[in-house]
Image (spheres, helix red, strand yellow):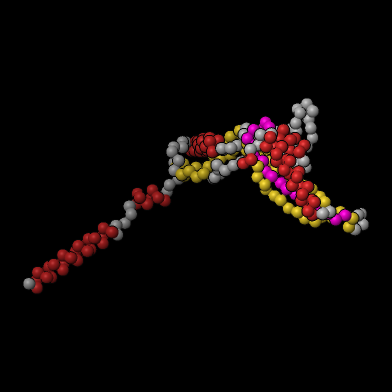
């Protein structure tokens, strides 16, 4: 009986040693070299798409001054209401008109000797317009100023949906990366295959703006304030790795 117990213990020890040997098997030299000796060419690719804007944003404002704060406010309200009604009649929908700023503060005029000459209250009221008809930007400015707006600034042109253009820019960026890798790898008689890594470096898809300046003057030939929307450049950048 004792000899049977000893035999069973010996068998268990052999099994444990066998399992331990399997779990602690060393990594082969071939596997190690595959991990540590991979050679990679990393390049940066850039792509650009130039498009015409189809959307504009404009800040219009009314500024009023009066020695009486209440009168300055009342005058501002009357003028701004007139401006809003005028631009609505010109085709701007109510949901595309948003108040972005309103403030009232006391101000002073000074003499050359830095003495206070006049004291008055100034009220500023600003609205932001979303204009979907790019060709009407100059007309809207003329309508607003005729109705009483005396501040026009920060005109921005953009595209309503730039995602499709950005996707095309990404394709161009990948092509540019491949061209760079081809040129580099040709110096040691290699060609790029499928990338081993691709990283989008530009994080695009967000709205891109182009700001324009405003000249508040009538062009008799054109019949409205001249505003040039120009073009918008949408860019994409990628980092690509090719092994060899």
Determine the image quadrant of residue 216.
Answer: top right
Residue found 58% across the figure and 34% down from its top: 49
Q: Name the spot of residue 174 as percent of width and height, x first.
A: 51, 37
Q: Farthest residue to the right: give it.
A: 113
| Nearer the observer, 76 or 231 | 76
Q: Farthest residue to the top: give it.
A: 221
Q: Name the spot of residue 130 as percent of width and height, x first.
A: 64, 39
Span of residues in magenta: 118-137
The answer to whether 164 is drawn above or below residue 127 in the figure is above
| Nearer the observer, 184 or 132 | 132
Residue found 67% across the figure and 31% down from its top: 135
Asked whether residue 42 is in view, the answer is no
Residue found 9% across the figure and 69% down from its top: 4
Asked whether residue 34 is in view, the answer is yes
Q: Farthest residue to the left: give it.
A: 1
Left or right of 226? Residue 28 is left
The quadrant of the picture occupied by the C terminus is: top left
Determine the image quadrant of residue 81.
Answer: top right
Q: Name the spot of residue 139 as percent of width and height, x first.
A: 72, 33
Q: Name the spot of residue 39 as percent of width and height, x first.
A: 45, 45
Left or right of 19? Residue 159 is right
- The kind of secondary structure the magenta stretch mainly shows is strand
| Nearer the observer, 140 or 5 | 140
Residue found 90% across the figure and 55% down from its top: 117
* Residue 121 colored in magenta in the image: yes
The quadrant of the picture occupied by the N terminus is: bottom left
Q: How many marks?
A: 0
* Residue 16 colored in magenta in the image: no
């Amino acid at each position: 009986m004792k000899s049977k117990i000893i035999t069973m213990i010996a068998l268990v020890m052999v099994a444990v040693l066998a399992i331990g040997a399997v779990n602690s098997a060393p990594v082969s030299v071939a596997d190690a070299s595959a991990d540590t000796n991979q050679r990679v060419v990393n390049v940066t690719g850039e792509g650009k798409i130039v498009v015409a804007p189809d959307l504009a944003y404009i800040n219009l404002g009314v500024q009023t001054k009066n020695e009486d704060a209440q009168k300055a406010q009342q005058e501002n309200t009357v003028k701004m209401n007139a401006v809003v009604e005028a631009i609505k009649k010109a085709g701007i929908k109510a949901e595309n008109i948003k108040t972005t700023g309103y403030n009232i503060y006391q101000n002073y005029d000074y003499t050359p000797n830095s003495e206070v000459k006049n004291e008055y209250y100034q009220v500023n009221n600003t609205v932001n317009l979303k204009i979907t008809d790019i060709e009407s930007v100059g007309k809207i400015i003329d309508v607003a100023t005729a109705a009483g707006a005396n501040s026009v600034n920060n005109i921005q042109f953009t595209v309503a949906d730039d995602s499709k253009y950005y996707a095309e820019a990404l394709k161009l960026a990948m092509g540019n990366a491949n061209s760079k890798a081809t040129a580099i790898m040709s110096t040691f008689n290699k060609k790029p295959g499928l990338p081993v890594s691709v990283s989008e470096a530009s994080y695009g898809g967000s709205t891109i703006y182009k700001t324009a300046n405003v000249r508040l003057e009538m062009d008799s030939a054109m019949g409205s304030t001249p505003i040039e929307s120009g073009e918008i450049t949408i860019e994409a950048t990628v980092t690509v790795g090719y092994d060899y």
